[in-house]
Each structure stands twice: as structure tokens, then as C-alpha cells.
Amino acid sequence: MRESRRLSLNADGHETAAWIYGGDEQERPLLMIHGFRGDHHGMDLIAGEIRDRPVIVPDLPGFGETLPLENGLGLQSYVDFLSALVAEVVRTGGRAPIVLGHSFGSILVSHLAAQQPEATPELILINPITTPALEGSARFATALTRAYYRLGAKLPQRAGRALLSSPVIVRVMSEVMATTDDPGLRSYIHDQHAKYFSAFSDRASLAEAFDTSVSHTVTEVADALTMPTLVIAGDSDAIAPIDATRSFAADLRDPSFVELVGVGHLVHYERSEAAASAIADFVRSRA
């Protein structure tokens, strides 16, 4: 695994744990935003493949080593946080970052880009959330999962934390999302989820972040995403179905679309080299 260095970024007063992978500091850095219940570890494989520029991977508020935001973990709170984080990266490094989001992170960065296109002159989305979780066939599974998070928040502390961090439930989630047949890679994915999927700050903020994750999509702001946008998706993604993602990408003003065959929602684990190659090509085309 490529080495990274921990740093603390001040996002408008909110101390943010982040990890930086070294690279040519004359090049614009990549700022990678992880998905729901993850932390910076989820982006390790892709970040480790990109060596021509610095890569910065923060823990989102409420996850890993970054505390929740004082004004909650709603969509606008996260967008305001990311805006401040981008400004801090510019202040400390002198160059505007290229912003990337995976899954839940794709929702956050796309809404940031829609509201502040000057902060995101280009955009990279991996496994973007393109379909509403509260509609269609997914709504029943979403309702069940929402009840799980709300129950975890309402139970007494010890019981609630045990439910939300249950190794059995985490393993089931991991099994459902993994598509690879490679036993070594599959074992690595399960190990990563076992170690880091329960690194959330507290039960209430986890439930609020979940509500945010299922209440919004990237398609809500598709018309406002006028900047060059790279979309990387797996054709077997059960969380973000490929047909909806193809339509989303086709409707963008300036899209680059990479569809990876035989992979689902865990492109960042299962096809990290291909994703990193697509990112490098996209970034070079923007130089």
C-alpha cells in the first residue's frame, strides 16, 4: 500500500482529518470524497495508483476521525463544509483541487459543483447515485434500512451501538455489494468493511447522514453540471443501476463516461487500477 501522511485541515473552523499522498506539487491535487459509512481508507487503492500529483482524502464529518458538524449532517451542511474544505486546500497548497466523489460522496460533490461551479471547474463521479432510493423497487429496502438506523439511534447507547456495528450485519452488507470472484480481493473488501464500516462518530449523526444519502441524487442537479465531468460506473451496480447512470451521463453538458464490465458499486476496490487510469486520462486532457 502506498504511504500517506495525516494532516489536519481547517474547514471554516471545523477540524478535518485528512490524508495526503505525495506527488508533483506543481500539479493540481485531487480531492477525493468517500461514500456513506466509509472513511479515507476506502479511497486508498485509487489514491495509491495516482502518482503524478498530490491526492488528498479527508474523513467526512461524522466518520473516521472527523467529528460531526455542529449544524447537522444535512445536504446543505455537507455542501457548505466541502466549499470551506476546497477553500482550505487552495489556501494551503495554492492550487484549486480536482474534486472527486464516490457514491454518497458523488451526491455531495455534485451539489457543490451545481451551487459553486467556480470551485469545481471539472468533476469526477464514481458510482454516482442516479436513482432516488425512496422511489421504485428500492423504496422497500430503503424503508427497512432507514428503520434499522433509526432503531439504532433510539435504543440505549450500548444496545444501539452494538446493532449498528454488528459484525454480522456489516458482513451481509459487504457480501451484497461485492461482485468479484477473486477470493483474495473479496477477503480484502470484507476486511476493510469490518475494520472501518463502523467508524462513525455517534448513532444520531449516522442516522441523519443516512437520511441525507437516500433523500438526494446527482440527477437533481444534472442540468447545472456544465463543467467537464468524468463518470465511472460498473455495469452490475445494484445500488446505482447502470441504465440510469448511462442516461445521466448522456444528458451532461460535457461528459466523459467510463463503464466497467463485471463490477458493481465497489469500483474503488474491485477496479481501482482501471478507475485510476480513467482519472489520469481525464485529468491529462484538462491540462
Image (cartoon, grey):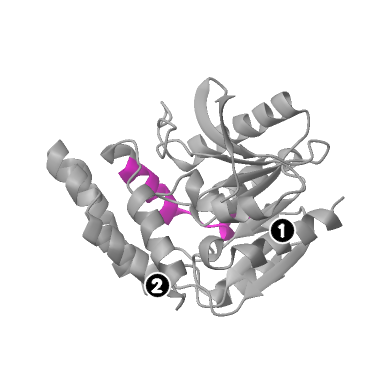
Of the numbered discs in the image, which one, if any, rests on residue 148?
Answer: none
Which of the 4 quarters of the picture holds residue 268?
Answer: bottom right
Label 1: few (<14), some or many (≥20) within 10 Å?
many
* Residue toward you, 86 or 276: 276
Q: Tell me the residue at 44%/32% (across/down).
A: 66
251 over 199 or under it: above or below: below
Q: Is residue 178 above or below residue 70?
A: below
Q: Give the crowd class for mark 2: few <14, some 14-19, many >=20 residues within 10 Å.
A: few
- Is residue 145 left or right of 279 when viewed as pictured? left
What SS does tag 2 mark? loop
Residue type of the residue flagged with mark 2? Gly
Identify the residue under disc 2.
136
> x%, y% of residue 116?
69, 39
Secondary structure character of the magenta stretch overall: helix
Q: Position of residue 182 (x, y in %)?
A: 46, 75
- Spot occupied by residue 202 in the image (x, y as percentages of width and height): 29, 36
Upstream in the sequence, badge 2 or badge 1?
2
Q: Which residues are magenta?
A: 206-221
Residue that extends furthest to the top in the rendered view of this protein: 13
Q: Which mark is residue 279?
A: 1
Per the image, is 212 magenta? yes
